[in-house]
Image: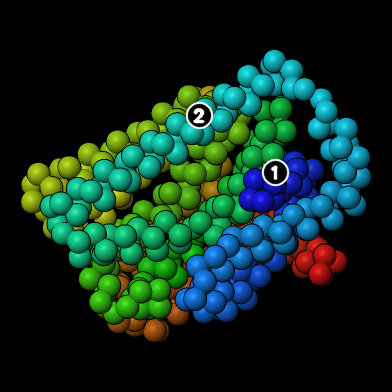
Amino acid sequence: VNVVSTCLLRLVQANGRFAAYSASQIASSAVLALIAYPVTLAALDEKAAFVAMIVLPCLVQIAFSLRTLRHAGEIPRLSSAIGIAPDEEGLRHFSRFILFGIGMIALATVAGAVVRALIVRYYGLEAAGQFQSAWTLGMQNLTLLLTPFMTYVFPVLSAAKEPNARRAAWIDIATVIVAAALPMVVAAIVLKPLLLRIFYTSEFLAAIPILQWMLLANYAKAISWLFAVATYSTGRLRWYFFGEATWNIVFVAMVFVSIHLHLPLEWIGIGFAVSYAVFLPLTAVICWRLLRLTFDARLLSLATFGMALIGASAWATWSETTIDWPVAAGAIAISGVVGLFALPPARRARAWDEVRDLIRSVRRTG
């Protein structure tokens, strides 16, 4: 069921129905949220009830996708395409992407397993729990922003064959990402004690020193993602894999250094930040050399100011286990205003139109 829903969603994405794609993700998440509590209660007696938590959101996505594809007139084409065998060139192209994708997943999985095993062995299980809580919150901070954008970025950049068109599309995407990431990172930094209490318990406040460094690196992560995704979407898979491999190798190496020098657990978070300090310029150079893509003056100013504001927010709340609400509210407000007005007026207007399109899509499907 999950494979079917994923394939149909990719067809929706390929047809440029991004509002419908987002609506299906929102609807499936809403269904999951509604059934999570009763399913968990039912699972106390019958473990098979957890199947509903997997299947029902997928069924919602399938229903959304089929409705969108039917309105787009894609169902007849899909039916006829099923009987067509792929040509050799198309199969080779597809296999290449699959193999590189599997390789990157395997690399990240091995690196993550090695890091966790080392932390358990040399720092203990309690430290491993602190690391995992910081890792989860740190990695999820921008996932809400970057994951939905992948569905838009890949087809748009892949379809832009002319350098000028590709640059215009990439600058537009980069402006939105850099502007939107700023308040998200600042909010996570100033509210980190609250996030740990909500998603874990107050016992996990000891993870703040690690989490602080991971969140501090997240803005660099968003910017480096822009360079890496441009490389990937144009089929430069070897260079993309090289960048990802470099990040994982540097991070694992920093963990080994921390252990060898008997440094405190906080240095694992510092190693995370150092990895992105290496990854960001590396991806920027690769993207420039291959595609001649780089930030314009407006974007560079926004990114520089954003990093300064994030640094100031981190400094003002460093290792605090309570929230200074005036400082937190001020930092979030400043970052939100800067992020909003960093967008050109025409792009702001278009962003509101895109939000309205999404709302209309949800209402139509509902």
Left/right of residue 116 with respect to residue 219 in the rendered view: left
- Reading the image, the residue beneath label 2 is 100
Query: Can residue 224 be seen?
Result: yes
Name the secondary structure under disc 1: helix
User: Which quarter of the figure has residue 310?
Assistant: bottom left
Callout in the foreground (2, 1): 1
From mark 2 to mark 1, how far is it between C-alphas?
A: 19 Å
Residue at the limit of the structure toward the front, as seen here? 45
Residue drawn where x is 52% and y is 27% of the image: 99
Residue at the limit of the structure toward the top, as seen here? 88
> Which of marks 1 and 2 precedes in the sequence?
1
User: Which quarter of the figure has residue 187?
Assistant: bottom left
Instruction: Point out residue 125 in the picture as x, y percentages from the top left corner.
Output: 20, 61
Residue drawn where x is 45% and y is 39% of the image: 105
Three-letter amino acid code of the residue under disc 1: Cys
| Relative height, residue 341 to residue 108 (above, below) | below
Instruction: Point out residue 298 in the picture as x, y percentages from the top left corner.
Output: 56, 49
Disc 2 + disc 1, Cβ < 8 Å: no
| Relative height, residue 103 to residue 275 (above, below) | above
Q: Residues within 10 Å of mark 1 (few under 14, many from 20)?
A: few
Name the secondary structure under disc 2: helix
Instruction: Point out residue 354 in the picture as x, y percentages from the top left corner.
Output: 75, 60
- Reading the image, the residue beneath label 1 is 7
| Relative height, residue 250 to residue 208 (above, below) | above
Name the image quarter holding the C terminus. Answer: bottom right
Residue drawn where x is 17% and y is 42% of the image: 256
Three-letter amino acid code of the residue under disc 2: Phe
Instruction: Point out residue 83 in the picture as x, y percentages from the top left corner.
Output: 83, 28
